[in-house]
Image (cartoon, rainbow, N blue to C red):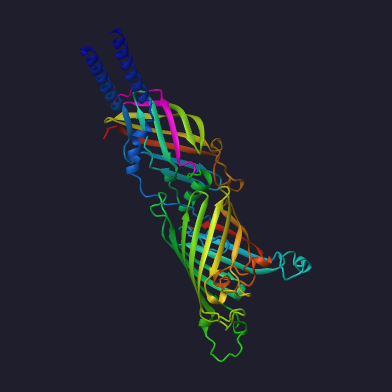
């Protein structure tokens, strides 16, 4: 009987310990610190867009990095572009989020040092899943993780069609940038 | 005793494993609460593709600092039960006839207020109008509809001879006000889901001047004011092609059992090519603008008196960023 109680106690303690380590190693995007932009440069038109509504999560104990971007929160020079973007290109009613789940090759970050990190995983955009590997910078400062990266996305890879009439207005390949400050996750 | 030990060990391993697996859990669940709390009310967009369907106005406005140019054309009857096939064929099934031609400019003062100026062939009508969308539907349906107010004033530039052509005895003075009529509409629309949108258009039409006319069946006299209800809907076939229909019912007693006037119905497609929107549809009304067609629709679908019509619109961004 004592043995059994002891065992239960031990297993319970393990439970607690592992839970503690779990929450300490997780970093999440600080409020309003995450910006995702994309830039399309075509002969007739240059289109920029910015999204500040995504919150990345980075688990340093496993290297998992995940982010979900609400497509409707991309802001443009004008409302017309935003509507076309949502309605005709990314079809955000059908596919409201772009999700990226990846693993980082580095998980130990020393205070004050900058690292070049590659995160590889699967991106899901416009209902299409594709492998994506992004290389960017991560710096730990005042116990925050500052991350930035930029990479290119080919729209055709994600079944986003550009009509021939607009081929001079919208680039086939857009440049995406990512900037964020992540802080330790505190369970409420 | 041995059995118990094994069981306990098994329990521990199980807990460990569950712990391991839970670490692989969806990290995004952690931020869901933060996402939700920071989320503002989201408004529905693109309930309709264009400023107008066939006959009906939509709750869509022209975006701020954008100018829209629209060209509308209404051909002649494709068929007509009152005419022989030969007669219709001589007009190339209506293609030779231009029942109405309208050009208009719409400008977005804000994203929700648009002013417009148009000119139509029917009645040589110049119209100025404004549309104000004062309520916007939200994606969570807490606000289930968008509501816009549309108001238009039509001014006919016809010569006095034509203006008073059907007056039996002209024993009243010629007045500028006789040329004017007004349409006021409340447009209540809901984007039910991504492919279906519906709207109701309670409408009031007022004409300053009418020629005395009676309904030959009931003897009811025509009036200056018409209460009208419009209904319209669209189905999105693909993200570039839309099927739509709209209908206006006139509640004035003059319209009941009247063999001379009918309710306008239009059915057609919208095709977006990026920048341009083409509207291709069939309608029984000859006139394009509401100030005219709500009054003077003399053809009916039941006699196959339908006309092909198209609209080309182009939007320009006036402000360069």
The answer to which image quadrant residue A167 occupies is top right
Q: Which residues are magenta?
A: A94-118
Residue extending farthest to the right is B86
Q: Judge whether B60 appears above or below B154 on screen.
A: above
- In the rendered structure, the answer to whether residue B109 lies left or right of residue B98 reads left
- In the rendered structure, the answer to whether residue B36 lies left or right of residue B230 reads left
User: In the image, residue A114 lies at what x, y percent?
Assistant: 35, 27
The answer to which image quadrant residue B5 occupies is top left
- Taking depth in this image into account, of B111 and B150 the one nearest to the observer is B150
- Taking depth in this image into account, of B44 and A15 the one nearest to the observer is A15
Is residue B14 among what the camera can see? yes
User: In the image, residue B86 lies at what x, y percent?
Assistant: 79, 67
- Taking depth in this image into account, of A27 and B287 the one nearest to the observer is B287
Q: Judge whether A105 appears above or below A147 on screen.
A: above
| Residue A116 is a magenta residue | yes
| Residue B273 is a magenta residue | no
- In the rendered structure, the answer to whether residue B76 lies left or right of residue A21 reads right
| Residue sitting at x 48%, y 44% | A92
The answer to which image quadrant residue B27 occupies is top left
Q: Judge whether A145 appears above or below B70 on screen.
A: above
Q: Judge whether B203 appears above or below B319 on screen.
A: below
User: In the image, residue B65 lies at what x, y percent?
Assistant: 46, 59
Quadrant for the N terminus of chain B, please: top left
User: In the image, residue B49 lies at what x, y percent?
Assistant: 53, 55
| Residue sitting at x 54%, y 42% | A171
Residue extending farthest to the bottom is B171
Residue extending farthest to the left is A2
Is residue B111 among what the camera can see? no
């Amino acid at each position: 009987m004592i043995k059994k109680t002891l065992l239960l106690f031990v297993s319970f303690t393990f439970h607690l310990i592992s839970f503690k380590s779990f929450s300490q190693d997780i970093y999440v995007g600080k409020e309003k610190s995450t910006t995702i932009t994309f830039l399309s440069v075509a002969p007739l038109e240059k289109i920029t867009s910015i999204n500040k509504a995504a919150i990345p999560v980075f688990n340093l104990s496993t290297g998992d990095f995940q982010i979900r971007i609400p497509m409707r929160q991309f802001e443009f020079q004008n409302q017309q572009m935003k509507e076309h973007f949502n309605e005709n290109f990314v079809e955000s009613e059908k596919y409201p989020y772009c999700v990226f789940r990846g693993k980082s090759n580095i998980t130990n970050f020393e205070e004050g040092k900058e690292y070049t990190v590659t995160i590889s995983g699967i991106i899901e955009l416009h209902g299409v899943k594709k492998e994506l590997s992004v290389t960017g910078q991560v710096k730990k400062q005042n116990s925050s993780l500052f991350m930035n990266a930029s990479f290119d996305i080919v729209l055709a890879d994600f079944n986003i069609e550009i009509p021939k009439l607009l081929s001079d207005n919208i680039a086939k390949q857009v440049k995406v940038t990512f900037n964020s400050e992540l802080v330790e996750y505190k369970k409420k | 005793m041995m059995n118990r030990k094994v069981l306990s060990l098994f329990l521990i391993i199980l807990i460990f494993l569950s712990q391991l697996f839970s670490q692989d859990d969806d990290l995004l669940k952690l931020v869901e609460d933060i996402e939700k709390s920071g989320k503002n009310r989201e408004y529905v967009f693109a309930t309709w593709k264009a400023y107008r369907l066939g006959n009906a106005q939509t709750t869509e406005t022209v975006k701020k600092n954008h100018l829209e140019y629209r060209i509308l054309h209404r051909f002649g009857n494709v068929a007509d039960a009152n005419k022989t096939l030969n007669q219709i064929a001589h007009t190339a099934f209506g293609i030779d006839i231009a029942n109405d031609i309208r050009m208009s400019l719409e400008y977005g003062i804000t994203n929700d207020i648009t002013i417009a100026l148009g000119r139509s062939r029917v009645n040589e009508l110049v119209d100025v109008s404004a549309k104000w969308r004062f309520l916007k539907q939200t994606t969570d349906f807490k606000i289930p509809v968008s509501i816009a107010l549309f108001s238009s004033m039509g001014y006919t530039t016809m010569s006095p001879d034509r203006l008073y052509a059907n007056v039996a005895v002209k024993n009243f003075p010629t007045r500028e006000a006789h040329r004017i009529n007004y349409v006021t509409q409340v447009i209540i629309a809901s984007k039910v889901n991504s492919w279906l949108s519906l709207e109701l258009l309670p409408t009031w039409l007022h004409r300053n001047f009418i020629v005395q006319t009676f309904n030959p069946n009931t003897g009811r006299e025509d009036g200056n004011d018409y209460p009208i209800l419009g209904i319209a809907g669209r189905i999105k076939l693909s993200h570039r092609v839309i099927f739509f229909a709209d209908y206006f019912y006139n509640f004035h007693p003059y319209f009941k059992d009247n063999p001379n006037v009918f309710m306008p119905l239009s059915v057609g497609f919208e095709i977006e090519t990026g920048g341009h929107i083409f509207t291709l549809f069939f309608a029984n009304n000859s006139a394009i603008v509401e100030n005219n067609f709500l009054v003077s629709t003399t053809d009916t679908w039941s006699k196959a008196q339908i006309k092909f019509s198209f609209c080309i619109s182009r939007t320009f961004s006036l402000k360069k960023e």
